[in-house]
Amino acid sequence: MRILVTGGAGFLGSHLIDRLMIADHDVICLDNFYTGNKQNVLQWIGNPKFDLIRHDITEPIRLEVDQIYHLACPASPVHYQYNPVKTIKTNVLGTMNMLGLAKRVKARFFLASTSEVYGDPEVHPQPESYRGSVNTIGIRSCYDEGKRVAETLAFDYHRQNDVDIRVVRIFNTYGPRMLENDGRVVSNLIVQALKGVPLTIYGDGSQTRSFCYASDLIEGFIRLMNCDYVGPVNIGNPGEYTILQLAKTIQEMVNPGVALKFEPLPQDDPRRRKPDITLAQKLLDWEPTVPLQEGLSRTIADFRQRLGSEVVASAVLR
Ligand SMILES: NC(=O)c1ccc[n+]([C@@H]2O[C@H](COP(=O)([O-])OP(=O)(O)OC[C@H]3O[C@@H](n4cnc5c(N)ncnc54)[C@H](O)[C@@H]3O)[C@@H](O)[C@H]2O)c1
């Protein structure tokens, strides 16, 4: 099949591309490199089955493809809040453009939505039927509401134009190739521990999150894309940890001597987050397989290598 991956040079997109290339598909990676990086897909450049297009999805594009995995959108608060209007445009105009493309070429369309559509949830864990508790005017709204509209668009194109859609709601995912400076909790803590600076905990660290390893998530993507159910389907790891537990685990694994420091909670930070994955288990026979310790040690190894080579590069430049 010829498969388009928007946001393909990003963290999750590039892992997805690895899987699709290994499965011998023709893959087009489309990215504006806002938070993505050519390095992430470097191993495929020059392969006749791989194309890389620099393009911003807020502008339409014409391509002939069989499937579209639509991931383009900055995912970390630091990046999506840097230019919130652009984030909304990416989620609304960008998703509309990609749905328009899917409609024209009759491609199956996969939307990477998010657990953020549940906002600060009053229901725990969150099943797909929960409608969410989102602040429409807060600093996270450009992303949360943007993704809610993206879901609405997908379902309207499905009902009105018969576009064949799949919608996944992704919960916190981590793994190699996360950006060092993206402000997400796993990368933040690992980078701080590796650099020997105090690990930042927002609030008292009692807020909970679940952490899914990237390869588990991508397996869920592929199963959903290739099944008959349109979604939405939660994909995430239901193991629930407090941020303090996570920080202590990383501290122990990387640098037991490093201190912890506490800072005020950012606005609208959800208190609890944990997926109900009953639907994914039943429909996709999917559940996560990589335990947190193992996923963390692979992620730490990747950061160690990248940070190490950065130190070498800056030493050479000097
Ligand atoms: N990583 C997670 O834990 C998580 C959780 C929930 C949802 N998601 C969703 O999964 C998708 C991928 O997330 P990620 O973690 O890989 O993030 P990422 O920031 O690493 O990747 C996003 C990619 O999209 C590209 N992009 C952004 N705006 C674009 C535009 N206007 N035109 C073209 N390309 C654009 C970026 O350059 C980047 O390569 C996003 O849609 C995100 O909302 C991720």
Image (tube, grey):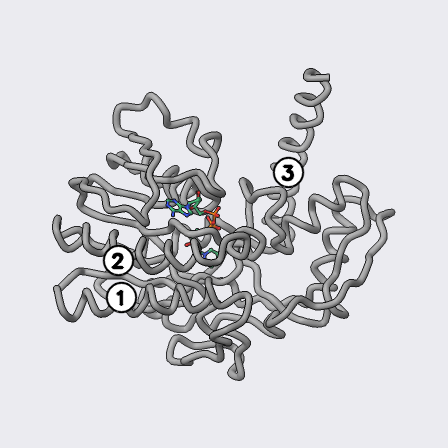
Judged from the image, the secondary structure of the residue bearing numbered disc 3 is helix
Q: Nearer the viewer, residue 185 or 251?
A: 185
> Residue sitting at 51 percent across and 76 percent down?
135
Is 138 placed above or below 55 here? below
Say which quadrant the N terminus sits in.
top left
Judged from the image, the secondary structure of the residue bearing numbered disc 2 is helix
For this view, does 274 lie left or right of residue 195?
Answer: left
For residue 17, what is the image quadrant?
Answer: top left
**Label tally:** 3
> Residue sitting at 45 percent across and 31 percent down?
38
Judged from the image, the secondary structure of the residue bearing numbered disc 1 is helix
Amino acid at dot 1: Leu
Question: Answer yes or no: do the residues labelled 3 and 1 have beta carbons within 8 Å?
Answer: no
Q: CA distance from mark 3 to mark 2?
A: 35 Å
Q: Is residue 106 visible?
A: yes
Point out which mark residue 132 bears: none
Question: Which mark's residue is nearer the viewer, 3 or 1?
Answer: 1
Amino acid at dot 3: Phe
For this view, does 65 lie left or right of residue 318?
Answer: left
Percent position of residue 305, x then y = 64, 31
Q: What residue is shown with label 1?
A: 153
Q: What residue is shown with label 3?
A: 303
Question: Answer yes or no: do the residues labelled 2 and 1 have beta carbons within 8 Å?
Answer: yes
How many residues crowd around disc 1 within 10 Å: few (fewer than 14), some, or many (20 or more)? some
Percent position of residue 238, x then y = 53, 67
Q: What residue is shown with label 2?
A: 96
